[in-house]
């Protein structure tokens, strides 16, 4: 093998293409470290040791630890960001109910709080989180685009902004550790949120 080909082989081996087994081991190690010790114990070095992976591989696949944190979070996330029940109120209720349940069971809430905490002091983390949330708002905005087509909300409603507004309620609940809420109370919350959006 020539020197050039050997160099190319080394680049491939350190992550030009992700190996599914290695990726899973790294994500699993990252989640375990977060759950066991919180954000203070989380580092690329610690993940590399536990996953028996090289730091260059991790940095090539996840340039910052925030991007790794987001992948850990998204790996376990199963919530439909734009449920389609046929009505705006029940769509929003389903979304918020599913998010609260997801954050309150398993490690999803703890991981996402770690992402938010990281974004408070690291500009790169803040940028990564903002980009992630912008994508989620665009996806979830489908709830409001469908509602417009059904004449359930006013024409002036901006789907992405509406999505940010309704999810702000559960974000606050997550950050203040108040994820448990009775279904009837959550339905009342949704009525408060939707009432100002309804077409006259």
Image (cartoon, helix red, strand yellow):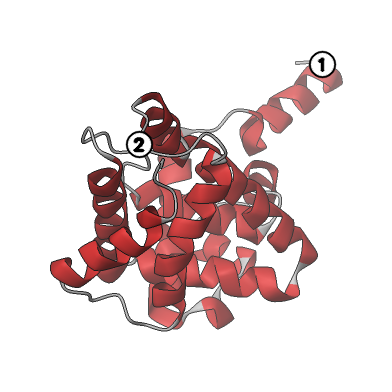
Labels 2 and 1: the sequence-earlier one: 1
Question: Extreme right residue here?
Answer: 3
Report the side of 59 relative to 34 (left or right): right
Between 134 and 168, which is closer to the camera in this rendering? 168
Q: Check disc 2 and report its element: helix, strand or loop.
A: loop
Percent coordinates x, y for residue 11 in the rendering: 72, 31
Count of numbered labels shown in the rendering = 2
The image position of residue 72, as x and y in percent, is 46, 54
Q: CA distance from mark 2 to mark 1?
A: 66 Å
Residue at 51 percent across and 49 percent down: it is 162
Residue tagged by mark 1?
2
> The residue tagged with tag 1: helix, strand or loop?
loop
Quadrant of image for the C terminus: top left
Quadrant placement of the N terminus: top right
Query: Where is residue 81 drawn, in percent x and y?
Result: 37, 43
Q: Is 51 or 200 nearer to us in this picture?
A: 200
Does residue 142 appear anywhere in the picture? yes
* Quadrant hosting residue 84: top left
Q: Are marks 2 and 1 in contact (CB under 8 Å)?
A: no
**One can see residue 105 in this view:** no
Residue 152, label in figure? 2
- Residue 77 position, x and y percent, is 35, 50
Left or right placement of residue 123 versus residue 151 in this view: right
- Toward the viewer: 44 or 177? 177
Above/below status of 55 relative to 143? below
């Amino acid at each position: 093998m020539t020197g050039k080909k050997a160099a190319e082989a080394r680049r491939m081996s350190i992550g030009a293409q992700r190996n599914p087994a290695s990726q899973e081991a790294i994500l699993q190690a990252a989640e375990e470290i977060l759950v066991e010790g919180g954000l203070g114990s989380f580092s690329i070095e610690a993940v590399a040791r536990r996953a028996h992976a090289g730091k260059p591989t991790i940095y090539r696949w996840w340039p910052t630890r925030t991007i790794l944190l987001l992948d850990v979070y998204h790996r376990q996330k199963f919530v439909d960001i734009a449920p389609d029940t046929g009505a705006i109120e029940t769509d929003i209720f389903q979304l918020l109910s599913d998010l609260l349940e997801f954050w309150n069971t398993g490690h999803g809430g703890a991981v996402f709080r770690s992402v938010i905490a990281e974004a408070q002091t690291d500009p790169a983390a803040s940028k990564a989180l903002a980009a992630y949330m912008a994508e989620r708002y665009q996806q979830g905005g489908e709830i409001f685009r469908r509602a417009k087509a059904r004449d359930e909300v006013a024409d002036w409603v901006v789907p992405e902004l509406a999505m940010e507004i309704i999810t702000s309620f559960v974000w606050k609940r997550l950050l203040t550790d108040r994820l448990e809420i009775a279904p009837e109370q959550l339905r009342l919350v949704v009525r408060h949120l939707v009432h100002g959006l309804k077409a006259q």
